[in-house]
Image: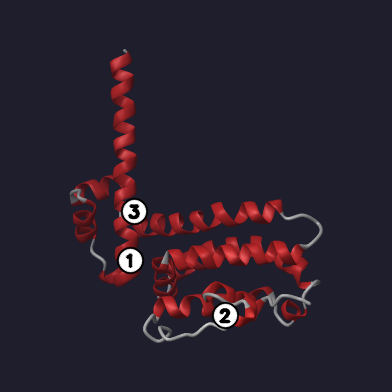
Amino acid sequence: MKETRAAGKRSAEDAEVTREAILTAALKAFSVDGFKAAGVRDIAASAGVSHGVVRHHFGSKMDLWKQALDQVFDYFGSRLIPLIQDAGEEDALADFRSVVAGFIDISLANPGFARLFVLSMRDEGERADYCAERFGQLHGAIGQLFYRAQKESPALAAHSNDSFFYCLMSLTYFRLLFPTLGAAVEYPVSQGIMDQKSLILSVLIPEQS
């Protein structure tokens, strides 16, 4: 009986490892090639499994894409939502700045996320709608803190929640999508701006004297 349970546990663990390998390969394929050009057989080969194994775990190509996208948004949520939940009643601006810094950190560390968002939103129909829905859930949660922080910052007062995040995503994603165009950026170190994150924060949420 113990051997049976142990074998079952190993089987479940192996299945999870396989799923993660497929999702990793799918995320790369969808972010580089887009949904239409990405091939399930190519994803399977990259993950080191057969085409049938991909179908077994995920069903259709669309379901695989959705779960790859879900993994991205879940990753953002797992790191940003706790920061929002821990925000106190006072100093909402500092808390909001931490959330924005977290968004930038995650995006810069995972450039494939930006490419996946952009390619997905270019599509018309179900994929664009699904991506917008998932982003809207995260955006809405962050928005609650934005409106509190807005009362403490003249810079934020010039924005709506939507316009702020349009600016944030534009500034964060531009160099990820067009790396050669931003390769020669010189940061004003004398002003305490050492890298892309500090530059973005200084533009969108400048420190108040």
User: Looking at the image, which residue is at 81% across and 59% down?
Assistant: 90
How many angstroms separate mark 1 from mark 2 (CA)? 37 Å
The residue at which mark 1 appears reads as 30
Asked if 148 appears above or below 14 in the picture, the reply is below
Residue 87 rendering spot, x and y as whole percentages? 72, 55
Residue 189 rendering spot, x and y as whole percentages? 57, 80
User: Looking at the image, which residue is at 69% across and 77% down?
Assistant: 206
Say which amino acid is labelled 3: Leu
Q: Residues within 10 Å of mark 1 (few under 14, many from 20)?
A: many
Residue 196 rendering spot, x and y as whole percentages? 52, 76
Say which amino acid is labelled 1: Phe
Q: The residue tagged with tag 1: helix, strand or loop?
A: helix
Is residue 72 something that shows in the picture? Answer: yes
The residue at which mark 2 appears reads as 189
Q: Which of 146 and 138 is in front in this view?
A: 146
The residue at which mark 3 appears reads as 23
Asked if 177 appears above or below 98 in the picture, the reply is below
